[in-house]
Amino acid sequence: MLNARESIEAEIVRLVQGAGGDAPALSLTTDLVGLGLTSLMFAELLIGMEMELGVDPFQGETSIVEMRTVGDLVTAYDDALAAASARA
Amino acid sequence: MTENPDTSGTTAEKTAGEGRVAVVSGGSRGLGRVLVERLLADGWHVATFSRSASDFVTEAMAAHPGSFHWEAVDLGEPETARTFVRNVHRVFGRLDLLVNNAGIVREELLFTMPPKAIESLITANLVAPIMLTQACARVMTRQGGGAIVNISSINAVRGYRGVSVYAAAKAGLDGFTRSLARELGGHGIRVNSVVPGYFDSAMTAEMPAASRARIERRTPLGRLAAADDVADAVLYLSSPRAEFVTGQSMVIDGGLTC
């Protein structure tokens, strides 16, 4: 199965650096807003992950902008990947 | 597919869309079919969907195996639009244009319209195009831009009895167009709508001769539009000639509402 955590962290680093920041040290408890992620960067993250992993966990009531930590994101994507693989 | 000499395209036109990819919703008949034919003639790769395949779809798949893609998608299930767009991206590798053309019309006084019919009119004419737009815009922004053209209706501009729910959805589509143009401009994505008046279609074919004559009389240019008149506006808004045009609604009605 695809590794969501690695992809998410790589995309976050790319977004933060793209906004002129230094590559952040990330853990599952890292606060996303604390990293300086804006709503537009959340959108880019969502789009990038959908292109790379082929899933979008945020098609229900919850939006990606409600995610607080890297771990929240990893859990959401891991669950969506597991659900997609169970459907296949 | 019957080759229409007016829409086969010159060599120059064919290079205009060469290699670019268009999604046209509801391309199996009517205006959607005309758009598909003209985009193919201009060298575009075209993906479209409808509830079921028409003879035109079957013929187009045979005539353009590498540049025409069709799937069965029901506007009543807007979430399936996302899967369709994913498939289009897998098949053609990019996406440059979305034409939100598909829609359904039901004429009935609001007094008697069943709630389920109200919901399905709004779903097919407003929710489905919004969901399709979201899926397409996500692809477009990753590749640096694109164009979206929403097919609205003269009912969004002027009131007509019997079409209030349809008009609400189409007016919603025009509002969506303007706000989304602001949201996506910075991503190189232009969003416009084309607002057709009465044009020759299956819908107007059932119109009583007296109604048709009245519309022609009230239209400064003296006739109903042809689907090609509407398609011309869509192709203009899709082209580099309109690269500084976004957030606009272009009324194509021969001056009926001016």
Image (cartoon, grey):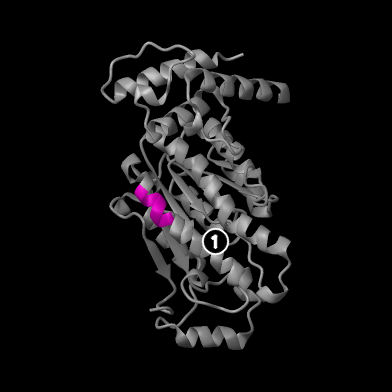
Residue at position x 58%, y 47% in the image = B48
Q: What stretch is highlighted in magenta?
A: B177-182
The residue type indicated by label 1 comes to Leu
State which quadrant residue A13 falls in. Answer: top left
In the displayed structure, B18 sits above or below B181; it is above
Q: Where is residue B184 in the image (x, y as percent from the top left)?
A: 37, 44
Q: Is residue B74 shown above or below A53?
A: below
User: Residue at left 56%, top 83%?
Assistant: B212
For mark 1, name the chain: B
For the point 53% across and 50% down, the residue is B130
Q: Where's residue B205, x and y in %?
A: 63, 75
Give the prevailing secondary structure in the magenta stretch.
helix
Q: Can residue B129 be seen in this view?
A: yes
Nearest to the observer: residue A40 or residue B201: A40
Which of B7/A57 is in front? Answer: A57
Q: Is B180 within the magenta?
A: yes
Binning the other alpha carbons within 10 Å of mark 1 as few (below 14), some (14 to 19) or many (20 upward) gives many
Which residue corresponds to mark 1? B31
Residue B10 can be seen, yes or no: no
Q: Residue furthest left?
A: A20
Q: Quadrant of the C terminus of chain B?
A: bottom left
**Magenta span includes B99:** no
Quick one: SS at disc 1?
A: helix
